[in-house]
Amino acid sequence: MDEKDLRTIIEQVLSEMNVSGSAAPAVEAACAKACEAPANIEDGCIPDITEVDIRSQYLVEHPEHGEEYAELKMNAPCRLGIGKAGARYKTLPQLEFRAAHSAAQDAVFNDVDEKMVEDLGLFIVQTQCDCKDTYLTRPDLGRKLSPEGVATIKEKCKKNPTVQIYVSDGLSSAAVAANIPDLLPAILQGLQNYKIDVGTPFFVKYGRVGVMDEISEITGAEVTCTLIGERPGLITAESMSAYIAYKATVGMPEARRTVVSNIHRNGTIPAEAGAHIADIIKIMLEKKASGTDLKL
């Protein structure tokens, strides 16, 4: 905000206050005082409150068992022990909460960067959802591929692979951007070490978990694995899950899916999760089962 904008605002305020007579001296004095006020920004940068680890944040004043409580809190990223200012939250926790809420909204409503997807060597298909609003209000359409998507998969994917892996945005575009560059190569490397045949990976836009059943039938894969962004919460907007099923078919019960969840930098890190997923797929192929039928 420059001095001209500041002067305009002060004039409007004085006008609304019905200041009589010439307001020029008052405007000049107010502008001079405001312009002299030092900025609270050091080195041109405002600290990012989203980078604060709330596990180590303990803001209760004069606690009786502060050390014990702080030690307990380190085991889980919960918004506990953040203190109060009277009946209200303190400013910092309140701002952190609003920032986390905004990040969650962005993760849901923003689309995945298609250039990033192409840089990973993935081609893109879409479900029957034509936009984000349809995706959010019609989950059933997110479980079905568009006719163009079906044709593209039949044309570009390897037929009858042992394992078919694909990525989907789900409810968090942020999860795809944050995890897939490390997660997908880790899985592929693990399966390669086990000498397991893998189909052509690709990306499904506006996908729900259930679309994996149709993809399994189209590709003829023994095991189908989807890496999908999960609904963001107020702890992280970047959580991803892997849903894996042995010979998935349309209409099969949800109990036949095996899930590896909480994949993000403060949970199970992508590289570690990738190795674990590769191990699970190997066991599935050996036991020819998944979900509740698979005893790990």
Image: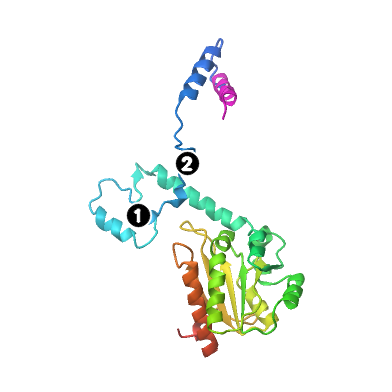
For the point 52% across and 89% down, which residue is it? Answer: 286
Closer to us: mark 1 or mark 2?
Answer: 2
Residue displayed at 43% across by 46% down: 94
Q: Nearer the viewer, residue 155 or 242?
A: 155
**Image location (x, y in percent) of residue 161:** 65, 83
Q: Determine the residue located farthest toward the left in the rendered image.
A: 64
- Name the secondary structure under disc 1: helix
Q: Is residue 113 above or below residue 11?
A: below
Packing grade of label 2 (10 A; few <14, some 14-19, many >=20) is few
Q: Is residue 144 above or below residue 239?
A: below
Question: Can you give x and y, in whole percent of width and height, for residue 249 in the image?
Answer: 64, 82
The residue pinned by badge 2 equals 46
Give the overall secondary structure of the magenta segment: helix
Q: Amino acid at mark 2?
A: Ile
Q: Quadrant of residue 11?
A: top right
The extreme bottom residue here reads 287
Provide the secondary structure element on which disc 2 rests: loop
Residue drawn at point x = 77 percent, y = 70 percent: 148
Image mark for residue 188: none
Q: Which residue is mark 1?
A: 56
Numbered range of the magenta stretch: 1-15
Which residue sits at x=46%, y=66%? 269
Q: Is residue 23 visible in this depiction of the protein?
A: no
10 Å crowding of disc 1: few (<14), some (14-19), many (20+)? some
The N terminus, quarter of image: top right
Q: Is residue 98 visible?
A: yes
The earlier-in-sequence mark between 1 and 2 is: 2
Which quadrant holds the C terminus?
bottom left
Where, by quadrant of the figure, is residue 151 drawn?
bottom right
**Image-quadrant location for residue 244:** bottom right
